[in-house]
Image: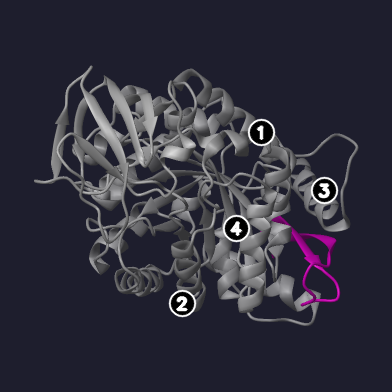
Amino acid sequence: MLDSVVIRRAKIVCTIGPSSEERQALEQLIRAGMDVARLNFSHGTHEEHGRRFQTIRAAADACDKPVAILQDLCGPKIRAGKFEGGTLDLPTDASIALVECTKDQQYAGPGEMPVLYEGLAEDLQPGDVVLIDDGRMVLTVTKVESRRVNAVATQGGRLRDRVGVSLPARRIRLAALTEKDKADLSFGLSIGIDYVALSFVKNAEDIRLVKDICEAWGRPTPIVAKIETPSAVENLESIIAVTDAVMVARGDLGVEFNPERVPVIQREILGLARVHQKPVIVATEMLQSMVTSSRPTRAEASDVATAVFDGTDAVMLSQETATGNHPPLVARVMSRIIVEAEQSHFFRPLASEIPGKRTNIAESVARNGCDIARDIGARVIVAFTESGSSALYASKHRPVVPIIAFSPNAATRRRLALLWGVVPWPIDKFTNADEMVERASMVLASQGVVSPGDKFVAIFGAPIGVTGSTNSIRVKVVE
């Protein structure tokens, strides 16, 4: 059970779609290295996602591996309506009129592009740049009339039904959580998703709103803040402070910022998240050529390795596993790239701590447990955890050995699947620390993780079973 995880610390998030939604494909993905399954609610119905959810759970049970399920909410994504014939060719320098449309009336006339956004003409002005299809087409506004915006294609192409439309972000009046998102979130909470990713976050209040909804449902759920807007970059530290994890959503970042800015923003996010001890997922086009190809480009392999060298907790596959030709192969390739980077002498992951500063007892205990493990040459660190916090603190210290996180809570074990270097394992509830450590020693020995004479460092809370009480370190010599 441990072999594939001991040598790979960074985790792999795979988007599930038509190419990977069947039971056999999911089991292959899990065995290839998937730790977190992403359900993209920008596409598909509740029925389809519910079916995928159940199949993922069944496949994970069959593979005897905790797999977290991440619900990625659509957010206020503005889209085009529909064109006669499904497409419209728009050459460079050609003129076009953007017209406001509704869900009930998505078609426009010849030479027009319908846009599903109320107040379109009010939020645009001459000189504004409108990006289509993640920047593959560029329109420049020339004149604004009532409910109609005239523009010229400074970079032409082919318009498609429901293609994404990016307006100047600072003038968008849509809330981060739309009515569709609220309905999707309610559905996700009802089936028991493990993480919620919020798209187009602008400030910390957006995160607090989603947390309040989860609390009202009686389902407190970790939130992943997707950083993809200029407002989010401006408010980055306050957002990271209140969220549970962060996603570097490079697709829309690349639309809102010039391409040369995106790698700098990525490193800024990784640095701040490290200090605040929040897991990070680096996403978008990591192995994009493998949607069809059986090998990545050298640049893609370097991109994945760079994220690993920079200390990311996870890397994400999107279209590659959702609609690509060979999802398990892509996951295996990504796993190999991660392992190669982590085994190189260039791999020196930075701990999150600020020298001399300990924010709480649990954090201090976890970090000192990691230091002891390094000093005595322990085989592994064992974290006994109800909520997962002690394993998180140990993970962010970036220890030299794996962290085996024993938890009696299945939901906690799944959420731990996202954390760098953490291997979640089940254990029975104990009330006695001696019995608990002995049981862990027996399990580790039976799995071949430790041998007689080996040492491991255990971190736990006393009294046993009290959430958030990590206060004890014990060194165990295996007999």
SS for tag 4? strand
The earlier-in-sequence mark between 1 and 4 is 4
SS for tag 1? helix
Q: Indicate the amino acid at tag 4.
A: Ile
Q: CA distance from mark 1 to mark 3?
A: 34 Å
Q: Residues within 10 Å of mark 1 (few under 14, many from 20)?
A: few
The earlier-in-sequence mark between 3 and 4 is 4
- Would you place residue 391 above or below residue 48 in this image? above
Foreground label between 2 and 3: 2
SS for tag 3? helix
Q: Which mark is residue 191?
A: 2
Q: Which mark is residue 234?
A: 1
Q: Which mark is residue 289?
A: none
Q: Indicate the amino acid at tag 1.
A: Glu
Q: CA distance from mark 4 to mark 2?
A: 16 Å
Q: Are marks 3 and 4 in contact (CB under 8 Å)?
A: no
Q: Quadrant of residue 25?
A: bottom left
Q: Residues within 10 Å of mark 2 (few under 14, many from 20)?
A: few
The earlier-in-sequence mark between 1 and 3 is 1
Circle 4 residue: 223
Foreground label between 3 and 4: 4
Q: CA distance from mark 1 to mark 2?
A: 34 Å
Q: Residues within 10 Å of mark 3 (few under 14, many from 20)?
A: some
| Residue under the point 87% across and 54% down | 360
